[in-house]
Amino acid sequence: MSRVGLPDLKLSEQFPGFLAFKAKSRTVAEVDQVQSTAPPAIETPLESLEAAYAKIRDELKAELLNRLKAGAPAVFERIVIELLVKMGYGGSRVDAAQAIGKPGDEGLDGIIKEDRLGLDIIYVQAKRWATTVGRPEIQKFAGALHGQHATKGIFITMSDFSRDANDYVSKIGSKIVLIDGSSLAELMIEFGVAVATDATYTVKRIGNDFFESI
Protein backbone atom coordinates (compact mmCIF):
# COMPACT_ATOMS: atom_id res chain seq x y z
CA MET A 1 0.00 0.00 0.00
CA SER A 2 1.34 3.44 -0.94
CA ARG A 3 1.76 6.00 1.83
CA VAL A 4 -0.04 9.33 1.39
CA GLY A 5 0.65 12.15 3.84
CA LEU A 6 3.76 14.17 4.61
CA PRO A 7 5.79 15.27 1.56
CA ASP A 8 9.24 13.89 1.03
CA LEU A 9 11.64 16.45 2.58
CA LYS A 10 14.40 15.61 0.14
CA LEU A 11 12.03 16.22 -2.73
CA SER A 12 10.84 19.52 -1.18
CA GLU A 13 14.38 20.76 -0.82
CA GLN A 14 14.69 20.78 -4.58
CA PHE A 15 12.45 23.89 -4.70
CA PRO A 16 14.10 27.29 -4.04
CA GLY A 17 11.00 28.64 -2.28
CA PHE A 18 11.08 25.91 0.31
CA LEU A 19 14.78 26.43 0.95
CA ALA A 20 14.23 30.18 1.47
CA PHE A 21 11.39 29.50 3.91
CA LYS A 22 13.53 27.01 5.80
CA ALA A 23 16.42 29.46 6.05
CA LYS A 24 14.13 32.26 7.27
CA SER A 25 12.61 30.01 9.93
CA ARG A 26 16.08 29.06 11.15
CA THR A 27 17.10 32.76 11.34
CA VAL A 28 14.00 33.72 13.36
CA ALA A 29 14.58 30.83 15.75
CA GLU A 30 18.21 31.83 16.23
CA VAL A 31 17.25 35.47 16.95
CA ASP A 32 14.63 34.36 19.49
CA GLN A 33 17.18 32.15 21.19
CA VAL A 34 19.72 34.99 21.39
CA GLN A 35 17.13 37.40 22.79
CA SER A 36 15.95 34.91 25.38
CA THR A 37 19.49 34.28 26.60
CA ALA A 38 20.67 37.91 26.42
CA PRO A 39 21.43 39.43 29.84
CA PRO A 40 19.00 42.11 31.09
CA ALA A 41 19.90 45.73 30.43
CA ILE A 42 21.88 47.27 33.26
CA GLU A 43 20.75 50.68 34.53
CA THR A 44 23.29 53.44 34.72
CA PRO A 45 23.82 55.05 38.15
CA LEU A 46 21.94 58.15 36.94
CA GLU A 47 18.97 56.06 35.76
CA SER A 48 18.88 54.27 39.11
CA LEU A 49 18.95 57.62 40.91
CA GLU A 50 16.09 58.99 38.78
CA ALA A 51 14.01 55.86 39.38
CA ALA A 52 14.60 56.08 43.14
CA TYR A 53 13.69 59.79 43.11
CA ALA A 54 10.44 59.08 41.25
CA LYS A 55 9.53 56.36 43.76
CA ILE A 56 10.23 58.61 46.74
CA ARG A 57 8.16 61.40 45.17
CA ASP A 58 5.19 59.08 44.52
CA GLU A 59 5.32 57.81 48.10
CA LEU A 60 5.43 61.38 49.40
CA LYS A 61 2.41 62.34 47.26
CA ALA A 62 0.42 59.42 48.67
CA GLU A 63 1.39 60.32 52.24
CA LEU A 64 0.45 63.97 51.73
CA LEU A 65 -3.02 63.02 50.49
CA ASN A 66 -3.52 60.64 53.42
CA ARG A 67 -2.55 63.34 55.89
CA LEU A 68 -4.84 65.86 54.21
CA LYS A 69 -7.79 63.45 54.33
CA ALA A 70 -7.15 62.63 57.98
CA GLY A 71 -6.50 66.22 59.05
CA ALA A 72 -8.94 68.86 60.24
CA PRO A 73 -10.65 71.25 57.79
CA ALA A 74 -8.55 74.10 59.18
CA VAL A 75 -5.37 72.27 58.07
CA PHE A 76 -6.67 71.90 54.53
CA GLU A 77 -7.66 75.60 54.48
CA ARG A 78 -4.23 76.66 55.76
CA ILE A 79 -2.45 74.55 53.12
CA VAL A 80 -4.60 76.00 50.31
CA ILE A 81 -3.78 79.52 51.49
CA GLU A 82 -0.06 78.78 51.82
CA LEU A 83 0.09 77.13 48.39
CA LEU A 84 -1.69 79.93 46.55
CA VAL A 85 0.49 82.58 48.19
CA LYS A 86 3.68 80.68 47.31
CA MET A 87 2.43 80.40 43.73
CA GLY A 88 2.23 84.20 43.63
CA TYR A 89 -1.46 84.78 44.32
CA GLY A 90 -3.18 86.62 47.14
CA GLY A 91 -0.54 89.19 48.06
CA SER A 92 0.28 88.32 51.68
CA ARG A 93 -0.84 85.39 53.85
CA VAL A 94 -2.97 87.80 55.87
CA ASP A 95 -4.77 88.99 52.74
CA ALA A 96 -5.32 85.44 51.53
CA ALA A 97 -6.51 84.20 54.93
CA GLN A 98 -9.11 86.98 55.03
CA ALA A 99 -10.43 86.00 51.62
CA ILE A 100 -10.48 82.19 51.78
CA GLY A 101 -12.27 79.80 54.10
CA LYS A 102 -15.36 81.90 54.75
CA PRO A 103 -18.64 81.19 52.97
CA GLY A 104 -19.00 83.77 50.24
CA ASP A 105 -21.77 84.85 47.91
CA GLU A 106 -23.70 82.04 46.21
CA GLY A 107 -21.74 79.35 48.04
CA LEU A 108 -18.26 80.38 46.86
CA ASP A 109 -15.60 79.61 49.45
CA GLY A 110 -13.67 82.80 48.94
CA ILE A 111 -11.74 85.11 46.69
CA ILE A 112 -8.05 85.74 46.26
CA LYS A 113 -6.07 88.43 44.46
CA GLU A 114 -4.54 87.35 41.17
CA ASP A 115 -1.48 89.48 41.91
CA ARG A 116 -0.08 91.56 44.74
CA LEU A 117 -1.66 94.74 43.38
CA GLY A 118 -5.09 93.17 43.29
CA LEU A 119 -5.72 94.13 39.66
CA ASP A 120 -8.01 91.11 39.33
CA ILE A 121 -9.53 88.54 41.65
CA ILE A 122 -9.99 84.79 41.44
CA TYR A 123 -12.84 82.93 43.10
CA VAL A 124 -11.84 79.78 44.97
CA GLN A 125 -13.76 76.62 45.79
CA ALA A 126 -11.89 74.17 48.04
CA LYS A 127 -13.60 70.88 48.95
CA ARG A 128 -12.28 68.03 51.08
CA TRP A 129 -14.46 65.52 49.25
CA ALA A 130 -13.50 61.87 48.93
CA THR A 131 -15.78 61.21 45.96
CA THR A 132 -15.24 62.19 42.32
CA VAL A 133 -16.38 65.72 41.51
CA GLY A 134 -18.74 65.63 38.54
CA ARG A 135 -19.92 68.11 35.97
CA PRO A 136 -22.96 69.34 38.01
CA GLU A 137 -20.73 70.72 40.76
CA ILE A 138 -18.50 72.49 38.24
CA GLN A 139 -21.58 73.92 36.52
CA LYS A 140 -22.74 75.33 39.87
CA PHE A 141 -19.32 76.89 40.37
CA ALA A 142 -19.37 78.40 36.88
CA GLY A 143 -22.86 79.75 37.56
CA ALA A 144 -21.67 81.35 40.80
CA LEU A 145 -18.82 83.01 38.89
CA HIS A 146 -21.28 84.32 36.34
CA GLY A 147 -23.43 85.71 39.15
CA GLN A 148 -20.43 87.69 40.39
CA HIS A 149 -19.53 88.84 36.86
CA ALA A 150 -16.25 86.95 37.34
CA THR A 151 -14.37 84.97 34.70
CA LYS A 152 -11.66 83.21 36.71
CA GLY A 153 -11.93 80.46 39.28
CA ILE A 154 -9.99 77.64 40.94
CA PHE A 155 -11.72 74.47 42.12
CA ILE A 156 -9.59 72.37 44.47
CA THR A 157 -10.46 68.91 45.75
CA MET A 158 -8.60 66.06 47.44
CA SER A 159 -10.33 63.53 45.19
CA ASP A 160 -10.54 63.79 41.39
CA PHE A 161 -12.73 65.16 38.60
CA SER A 162 -14.85 63.22 36.14
CA ARG A 163 -14.15 63.33 32.40
CA ASP A 164 -17.40 65.28 31.89
CA ALA A 165 -16.21 67.90 34.38
CA ASN A 166 -12.90 68.34 32.56
CA ASP A 167 -14.65 68.48 29.17
CA TYR A 168 -17.07 71.10 30.48
CA VAL A 169 -14.39 73.56 31.67
CA SER A 170 -12.61 73.30 28.32
CA LYS A 171 -15.69 74.56 26.47
CA ILE A 172 -17.00 77.43 28.59
CA GLY A 173 -16.05 81.10 28.48
CA SER A 174 -14.97 81.33 32.12
CA LYS A 175 -11.42 80.29 32.92
CA ILE A 176 -11.72 77.58 35.56
CA VAL A 177 -8.71 75.59 36.74
CA LEU A 178 -9.40 72.18 38.28
CA ILE A 179 -6.86 70.94 40.84
CA ASP A 180 -7.39 67.33 41.92
CA GLY A 181 -5.71 65.52 44.79
CA SER A 182 -2.77 64.30 42.74
CA SER A 183 -2.13 67.76 41.27
CA LEU A 184 -2.51 69.34 44.70
CA ALA A 185 0.15 67.04 46.15
CA GLU A 186 2.45 67.74 43.18
CA LEU A 187 2.11 71.50 43.70
CA MET A 188 2.71 71.17 47.43
CA ILE A 189 5.98 69.34 46.74
CA GLU A 190 7.03 71.77 43.99
CA PHE A 191 6.40 74.90 46.08
CA GLY A 192 7.54 73.44 49.40
CA VAL A 193 4.23 73.44 51.29
CA ALA A 194 3.94 71.02 54.25
CA VAL A 195 7.13 69.24 53.15
CA ALA A 196 10.75 69.47 54.23
CA THR A 197 13.99 68.74 52.38
CA ASP A 198 15.54 65.53 53.65
CA ALA A 199 18.63 65.41 51.45
CA THR A 200 20.04 67.07 48.35
CA TYR A 201 22.33 65.43 45.83
CA THR A 202 24.14 67.34 43.10
CA VAL A 203 25.16 65.21 40.10
CA LYS A 204 28.11 66.68 38.24
CA ARG A 205 29.75 65.84 34.92
CA ILE A 206 32.94 66.72 33.08
CA GLY A 207 32.99 70.30 31.80
CA ASN A 208 34.04 69.69 28.20
CA ASP A 209 34.06 73.40 27.37
CA PHE A 210 36.81 73.99 29.91
CA PHE A 211 39.10 71.28 28.55
CA GLU A 212 38.46 72.21 24.91
CA SER A 213 39.30 75.86 25.53
CA ILE A 214 42.82 75.07 26.80
Image (spheres, rainbow, N blue to C red):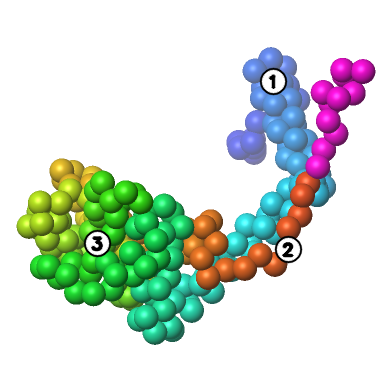
- Considering the image in quadrants, where does the C terminus appear? top right
Query: Relative to 110, is 201 above or below?
Result: above
Amino acid type shown at disc 2: Ala
**Residue 199 numbered tag:** 2
Query: Relative to 169, is 134 above or below?
Result: below
Rendered location of residue 99, percent (x, y): 27, 67
The residue pinned by badge 3 equals 111
Q: Do the residues labelled 1 and 2 touch (CB within 8 Å)?
A: no
Is 120 or 161 nearer to us in this picture? 120
Amino acid type shown at disc 1: Ala
Amino acid type shown at disc 3: Ile
> Label 2 crowding class (10 Å Cα cut-off): few <14, some 14-19, many 20+?
few
* Real-space Cα separation, disc 1 to disc 3, in angstroms: 76 Å
Q: Are marks 3 and 2 in contact (CB under 8 Å)?
A: no
- Using residue 61 as the reference point, say whether residue 94 is left or right of it: left
Quarter holding residue 12: top right
**For numbered disc 3, what is the local secondary structure?**
strand
At 23% from the left and 66% from the top, the residue drawn is 110
- Considering the image in quadrants, where does the N terminus appear? top right
At 17% from the left and 48% from the top, the residue drawn is 151
**For numbered disc 1, what is the local secondary structure?**
helix
At 10% from the left and 68% from the top, the residue drawn is 106
Q: How many numbered circles does the render carry?
A: 3
Rendered location of residue 93, percent (x, y): 40, 65
> Label 1 crowding class (10 Å Cα cut-off): few <14, some 14-19, many 20+?
few
Q: Give the range drawn in magenta.
A: 204-214
